[in-house]
Image: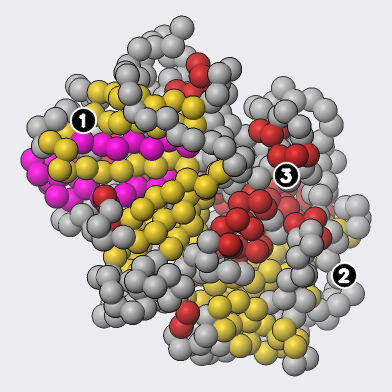
């Protein structure tokens, strides 16, 4: 069971979206989500995915344990007692009766009607080659946005099951990682608010000459499906839509409404969600504060037993989820099982005080960390010449966790996948005192959808080609528990995601290949120094 830590216990938590009044939910300053209306008069499967769970005790691979999650809309006033198993609905591949996680609400019909939807879950049979949701004997047609399917068939609630895991790449595994995939959009033409982008434009051709004004998540999803991944990792920050100060401070809680989750993730990412199981990370946009989006994330993607912000403390910020892990291996047994750690760094203060990196930092190198905040970065943020290398609380949490292997580096993760910064950056870290043989690779892949950062290491190359490769020294600053770290750095202001292929011979046990929204986005070799502040 996951734990919740509460700050300032006893003060009210921000109300979850299903507890809000119609007046609160109908805040007229909030742009209407650009999604199709659901079938308000019928039973409809609105979303479906397979979610990866923590390894249980005595787990033996090669596949992680997964469960089916799906979202059902019932006709108004016709919700049955068993909302997740209405008449005519059957589950394919389930090993137990479904259960209900949460009820969410959304607006439809030009924000004149409220609908409710039920988030359901069911355990899966590890031997199931196919899973899905059927209505009246046929796989259910899924709620979808035709824009995201173009010339592809409309989706149904059907996908490969647990028995397929680890068999798509002979002698290996493939995974997809993306982060910060939401769209920083707003209605109208004012593009002054934090690098606005047009969420209705989903291909680079839609904005000739300015592809960074478009939104690439659906394009990433289809490209990733073509890579036949065994599993999908997300680093958090799914939801950005409409960033404007008056809205953030409105206190309406409207940011967690269900239609926005469909607009920014469940619909554009639907092709990928139907292709492979998902391990969802949590970012700072998924904390439970009123102006953020934690209520929706916990209801949809939260761990077993935690589906709301209840008990999360003053302003909803006092929630920290336990780090958890799962193991993966090829189905044919050609490679040993490998551990993936999902680390909740959404609230960096609690990441430090709770020690969320402690368990992932135990001895052993054959492990991959997924954490929203990077353990180190190489960026400039106009700080008068001082390089900003990461959130101080998060850095302290990582340094404390890796203190036991300061002299050897034998508890460093092989590979770290993170986001938060809206760019792509690869840091290949070594310690001067340990030599090149001990290396940890950090990939900051916050280029999954939201518009690129205005500042940062690529900023002074932005007017050139947005790419840079260089070498840096972190001497005198503590990184991975040491004060003699250096990095070869490659960075790019360009949309994309990462494709990982398990390869025991590769550095870190995985080949990591950036996939780009625009075809020609080569990375530069790390040459020259990063340590000169840009003019």
Q: Which residue is mark 1?
A: 485
The residue mark sitting in front, 1 or 3, is 3
Q: Is residue 163 above or below residue 493?
A: below
- Dots 1, 2 in contact, CB < 8 A: no
Q: Is residue 530 above or below residue 35?
A: above
Q: Is residue 290 visible?
A: no
Element under label 2?
Answer: loop
Please identify the quadrant where the N terminus is shown.
bottom left
The residue mark sitting in front, 3 or 2, is 3
x, y percentage for residue 103?
Answer: 68, 68
Residue at (67%, 82%) from the top-left corner?
Answer: 133
Q: Which residue is mark 3?
A: 203
Queried whether the magenta region covers residue 427, the answer comes back as yes
x, y percentage for residue 198?
Answer: 75, 37
* Number of marks in the rendered image: 3
Label 2 crowd bin: few (<14), some (14–19), many (20+), radius 10 Å = some
**Residue 81 in the figure: left or right of residue 40:** left
Q: Marks 1 and 3, Cα distance to the nearest angstrom?
A: 40 Å
Element under label 3?
Answer: loop
Q: Is residue 90 visible?
A: yes
x, y percentage for residue 164?
Answer: 47, 79
Quadrant housing residue 196: top right
Q: What residue span does the magenta drawing correspond to?
A: 401-430
Label 1 crowd bin: few (<14), some (14–19), many (20+), radius 10 Å = many
**Residue 261 in the figure: left or right of residue 323:** right
**Residue 277 in the figure: left or right of residue 332:** right
Q: Which mark is residue 40?
A: 2
- Dots 1, 3 in contact, CB < 8 A: no
């Amino acid at each position: 069971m996951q734990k919740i830590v509460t700050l300032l216990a006893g003060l009210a938590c921000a109300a979850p979206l299903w507890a809000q009044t119609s007046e609160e939910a109908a805040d007229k300053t909030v742009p209407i989500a650009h999604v199709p209306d659901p079938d308000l008069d019928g039973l409809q499967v609105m979303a479906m995915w397979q979610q990866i769970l923590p390894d249980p005790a005595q787990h033996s691979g090669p596949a992680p344990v997964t469960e089916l999650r799906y979202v059902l809309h019932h006709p108004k006033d016709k919700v049955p007692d068993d909302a997740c198993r209405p008449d005519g609905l059957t589950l394919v591949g389930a090993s137990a009766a479904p259960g209900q996680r949460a009820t969410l609400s959304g607006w439809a019909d030009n924000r004149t009607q409220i609908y409710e939807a039920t988030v359901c879950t069911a355990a899966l049979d590890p031997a199931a080659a196919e899973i899905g949701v059927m209505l009246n004997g046929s796989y259910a047609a899924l709620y979808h946005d035709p824009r995201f399917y173009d010339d592809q068939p409309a989706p149904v609630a059907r996908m490969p099951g647990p028995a397929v895991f680890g068999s798509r790449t002979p002698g290996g595994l493939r995974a997809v990682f993306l982060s910060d995939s939401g769209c920083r959009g707003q209605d109208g033409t004012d593009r002054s608010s934090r690098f606005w982008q047009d969420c209705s434009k989903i291909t680079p051709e839609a904005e000739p000459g300015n592809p960074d004004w478009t939104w690439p998540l659906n394009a990433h999803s289809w490209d990733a499906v073509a890579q036949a991944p065994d599993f999908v990792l997300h680093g958090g920050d799914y939801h950005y839509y409409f960033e404007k100060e008056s809205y953030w401070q409105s206190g309406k809680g409207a940011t967690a409404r269900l239609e926005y989750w469909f607009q920014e993730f469940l619909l554009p990412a639907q092709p990928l969600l139907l292709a492979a199981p998902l391990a969802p990370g949590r970012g700072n946009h998924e904390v439970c504060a009123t102006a953020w989006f934690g209520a929706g994330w916990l209801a949809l993607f939260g761990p077993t037993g935690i589906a709301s912000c209840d008990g999360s403390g003053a302003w909803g910020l006092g929630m920290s989820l336990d780090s958890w892990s799962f193991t993966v291996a090829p189905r044919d047994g050609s490679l040993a099982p490998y551990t993936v750690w999902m680390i909740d760094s959404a609230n960096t203060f609690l990441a430090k005080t709770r020690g969320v990196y402690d368990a992932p930092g135990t001895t052993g190198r054959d492990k991959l960390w997924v954490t929203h905040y990077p353990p180190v970065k190489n960026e400039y943020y106009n700080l008068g010449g001082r390089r900003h290398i990461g959130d101080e609380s998060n850095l302290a949490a990582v340094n404390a966790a890796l203190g036991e292997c300061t002299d050897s580096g034998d508890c460093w993760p092989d590979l770290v996948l993170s986001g938060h910064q809206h760019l792509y950056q690869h840091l290949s870290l070594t310690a001067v005192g340990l030599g090149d043989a001990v290396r940890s690779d950090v990939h900051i892949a916050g280029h999954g959808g939201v518009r690129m950062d205005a500042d940062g290491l690529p900023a002074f190359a932005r007017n050139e080609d947005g790419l840079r490769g260089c070498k840096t020294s972190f001497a005198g600053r503590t990184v991975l528990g040491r004060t003699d770290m250096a990095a070869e750095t490659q960075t790019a202001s360009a949309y994309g995601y990462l494709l990982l292929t398990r390869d025991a011979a590769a550095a870190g046990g995985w080949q990591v290949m950036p996939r780009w929204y625009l075809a020609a986005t080569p990375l530069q070799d790390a040459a020259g120094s990063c340590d000169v502040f840009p003019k």
